[in-house]
Structures are given as C-alpha cells and as structure tokens.
Image (cartoon, rainbow, N blue to C red):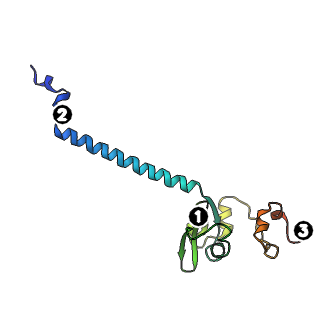
C-alpha cells in the first residue's frame, strides 16, 4: 500500500479539531459584531437629521434649554457640549447638528451654498408671531406671516 493512500478522514489530528473550534469561535464573534453594527446602523437611520449652520452657540442652546420638553428631549437625550456650545443634541427620533463643525474654519453659509451651486435665500422666523408651540402643529399657520395671520 502506498503512503499517499493512507490520508483519509480518519487521519485527523487534535490540531485539526482545535483549528476548527477556533474558526467556529471566530465566525460566532464576527456574527455578533455584525449584528451589533447592524443594530447601531438601524438606530442611526431611524433619526431625522436636522442640520443648522453655525448653530452651536444659539440655536442648539435654544433647542436644548427651551424646546426640550416639546421635542421630548428628556434626560435620556444624547448631548455633546463644549464650553457653552452644544455640538449635538439627539434623541431616538431627532439629531441636531451644526454643519459648520464639519467644515474648514472660516467657511461661510454663502460659500457653502455656492460650492453646491445653490442659490442663497434667507428666510426669517417671525418671532413676534410665534408665541406658542401649538402654532407649529398647524401646518397652515407656518405659511402665514405675522401680518397675514388673524
């Protein structure tokens, strides 16, 4: 009988069993990591991203301090704060970010829009008219200016 004929399935060594066990453990670990990553990605996709420009010092502070109770931003909100500026305020449904934090220093809103060939159009919030959060719940009232609102 030739030596090459003796290499069958019954010739497995303890090292082969150890290698198989390690590979199975690695597959299990990788599967768990992928499940965690998928779960985190699903959570990220479930949030509505609200971007502001240069909003860390005023807009996000206002959102966190004044509008928090109306937006269900309870103590379980995720907050990133540096000095007196909020960089991120997030809940399960909303994530408020300042896009200027992702741009080179000195970037302006005009330059940002121009880079994407978007025409600059500034709108103003009618602070005098907006005296109740209930007005935000009425979609028709959002299109009215203070002079046209009864």
Q: Secondary structure at mark 1?
A: loop
Q: Secondary structure at mark 2?
A: loop
User: Residue 57 placed where, x, y %?
Assistant: 62, 77
Q: Quadrant of residue 127?
A: bottom right
Give the vertical position of 23 relative to 146 (above or below): above
Give the vertical position of 65 relative to 20 (above or below): below
Q: Earlier in the sequence, mark 3 or mark 1?
A: 1
- In the image, farthest residue toward the top: 1
Q: Earlier in the sequence, mark 2 or mark 1?
A: 2
Q: Earlier in the sequence, mark 3 or mark 2?
A: 2
The residue that disc 3 covers is 148
Q: Residues within 10 Å of mark 3 (few under 14, many from 20)?
A: few
Q: Does 37 sit left or right of 51 as displayed?
A: left
Looking at the rendered structure, which numbered label has been put on residue 12? Answer: 2
The residue that disc 1 covers is 91
Q: Residue at x 48, y 50 (%)?
A: 38
């Amino acid at each position: 009988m030739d030596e090459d004929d003796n290499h069958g399935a019954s010739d497995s060594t303890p090292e082969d069993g150890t290698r198989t066990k390690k590979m199975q453990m690695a597959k299990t670990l990788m599967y768990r990591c992928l499940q965690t990553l998928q779960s985190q990605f699903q959570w990220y996709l479930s949030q509505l991203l609200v971007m502001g420009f240069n909003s860390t010092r005023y807009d996000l502070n206002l959102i966190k301090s004044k509008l928090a109770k109306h937006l269900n931003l309870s103590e379980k909100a995720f907050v990133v704060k540096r000095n007196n500026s909020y960089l991120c305020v997030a809940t399960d449904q909303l994530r408020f970010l300042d896009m200027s934090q992702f741009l080179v220093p000195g970037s302006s809103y005009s330059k940002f829009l121009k880079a994407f060939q978007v025409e600059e159009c500034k709108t103003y919030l009618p602070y005098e008219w907006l005296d109740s959060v209930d007005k935000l719940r009425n979609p028709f009232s959002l299109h009215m200016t203070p002079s046209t609102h009864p």
